[in-house]
Image (cartoon, rainbow, N blue to C red):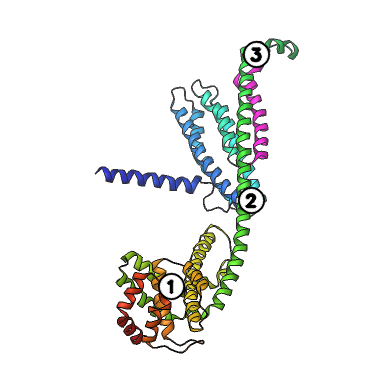
């Protein structure tokens, strides 16, 4: 029961994260190297935030209309706020989606959204500043507007919005918050200013202004750092894609050369014969099921060369998805190249002993290449089949002749126990070769 409840809570959290990422995630499926795409996504997110903000404003106005001091005007404003919220959001959506790939139109949408954010906060404050319990909360909306605009990570926009908002805040302080016109009375400006400077209203206005400026500097610093990090990240991704493109060219050309020069090592019939014989030998050696499965896959992996042969032609774009594909194909290419190295090792050993060019130095060089037991099993099976069959540099050899070679000079290339197992059951391997 507890476990089921835990899973349901986890599912709710996952659902919440998915919803948040869809409506408020700034990098939801966005190529950060595309400035227009990034701006479009930010506009969409800000539009959604504006919609939520409008709903909150409507709820505040509705609660105000329910209060005992509520007037008829409060009910009218609350009633009009709901459809107005929908209309504004619809307008922003139409403006943003007019052309998602046009930077000018997206910039216009950005400035319209920013203007509406701080203008709506001022209107709400103008509506609520006289209410004793609403004035402080409504004033915080000015700071909220700056934070929302800062989400664009655009210093110029933030600076322009701050200047406009600071000017409007100053007007609000003098006209609405403290009604300076009522304090002036019949005095002239020159007579009023010395008295006003000593009044608590002036101290409060000064404190509010200084706090707002300080808040702006902090937000501006955060935006500057965020914009710098975003730009660095974008440049790093651009460089990575350039390297990825160059790497695709190099690897593609390299694979093409390797495959064209090693075509004889990719004979399907020979590969299947090696795989079956090495699987039988692995049983006699006592290889675990997991290692035997991995060995079987490795024995046949070079036949998948067609999947990466045209690697360069397949790379038309260089986004995160293509990067994963390139990584996957490169790893496959590495395994294929390693398998071909083992096949070439078999070919070199067979030719060296047929042409009698093998020496101590050659033996040491061969022993260094893929000494793992799984590779030795494949190599032994491959070498036996190679020695038995026809090659441009040799004629087919009988089982007894090949067996004598494995008992003498060829035995030095393999683990002692592996070689002994092969020699003990050599009749079965001869039968497998003859019946294939």
Quadrant assignment, res 220 = top right
Disc number lying in front (3 or 2): 2
- How far is mark 3 from mark 2, CA to CA? 57 Å
**Do labels 2 and 1 touch, CB within 8 Å?**
no
Percent x, y for residue 128? 53, 26
Q: Is residue 409 left or right of residue 40?
A: left
Judging by the rendered image, the residue that carries numbered circle 1 is 413
Closest to the observer: 270 or 98?
Answer: 270
Is 217 above or below relative to 399?
above
Percent x, y for residue 86? 51, 43
Q: Is residue 64 visible?
A: yes
Whether residue 341 is in magenta: the answer is no
Q: Residue at x 65, y 17 (%)?
A: 180
Q: Residue at x 60, y 41 (%)?
A: 226
Quadrant assignment, res 213 = top right
Closest to the observer: 290 or 122?
Answer: 290
**Do labels 3 and 1 touch, CB within 8 Å?**
no
Judging by the rendered image, the residue that carries numbered circle 3 is 183
């Amino acid at each position: 029961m507890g476990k089921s409840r835990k899973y349901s809570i986890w599912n709710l959290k996952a659902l919440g994260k998915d919803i948040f990422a869809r409506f408020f995630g700034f990098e939801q499926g966005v190529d950060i190297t595309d400035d227009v795409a990034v701006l479009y996504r930010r506009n969409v997110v800000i539009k959604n935030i504006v919609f939520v903000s409008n709903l909150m404003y409507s709820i505040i106005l509705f609660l105000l209309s329910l209060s005992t001091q509520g007037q008829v005007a409060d009910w009218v404003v609350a009633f009009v706020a709901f459809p107005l919220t929908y209309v504004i959001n619809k307008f922003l959506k139409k403006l943003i989606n007019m052309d998602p790939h046009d930077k000018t139109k997206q910039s216009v949408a950005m400035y319209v959204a920013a203007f509406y954010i701080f203008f709506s906060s001022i209107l709400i404050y103008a509506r609520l500043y006289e209410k004793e319990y609403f004035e402080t909360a409504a004033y915080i909306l000015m700071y909220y507007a700056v934070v929302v605009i800062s989400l664009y990570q655009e210093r110029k926009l933030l600076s322009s919005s701050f200047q406009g908002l600071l000017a409007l805040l100053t007007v609000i302080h003098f006209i609405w918050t403290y009604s300076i016109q009522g304090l002036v009375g019949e005095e002239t400006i020159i007579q009023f200013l010395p008295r006003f400077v000593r009044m608590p209203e002036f101290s409060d206005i000064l404190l509010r202004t200084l706090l707002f400026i300080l808040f702006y500097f902090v937000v501006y610093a955060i935006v500057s750092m965020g914009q710098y990090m975003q730009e660095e990240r974008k440049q790093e991704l651009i460089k990575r894609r350039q390297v990825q493109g160059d790497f695709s060219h190099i690897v593609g050309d390299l694979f093409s050369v390797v495959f064209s020069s090693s075509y004889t090592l990719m004979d399907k019939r020979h590969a299947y014969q090696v795989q079956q014989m090495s699987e039988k030998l692995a049983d006699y050696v006592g290889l675990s099921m997991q290692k035997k499965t991995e060995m079987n896959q490795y024995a046949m992996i070079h036949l998948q060369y067609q999947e990466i042969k045209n690697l360069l032609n397949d790379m038309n774009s260089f986004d995160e998805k293509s990067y994963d594909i390139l990584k996957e194909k490169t790893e496959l290419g590495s395994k294929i190249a390693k398998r071909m190295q083992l096949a070439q090792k078999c070919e070199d050993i067979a030719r060296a002993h047929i042409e009698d060019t093998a020496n101590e130095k050659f033996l040491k060089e061969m022993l260094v290449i893929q000494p793992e037991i799984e590779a030795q099993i494949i190599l032994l099976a491959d070498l036996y089949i190679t020695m038995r069959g026809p090659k441009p540099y040799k004629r087919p050899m009988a089982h007894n002749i090949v067996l004598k070679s494995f008992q003498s000079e060829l035995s030095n290339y393999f683990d002692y126990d592996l070689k002994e197992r092969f020699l003990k059951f050599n009749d079965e391997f001869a039968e497998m070769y003859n019946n294939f």
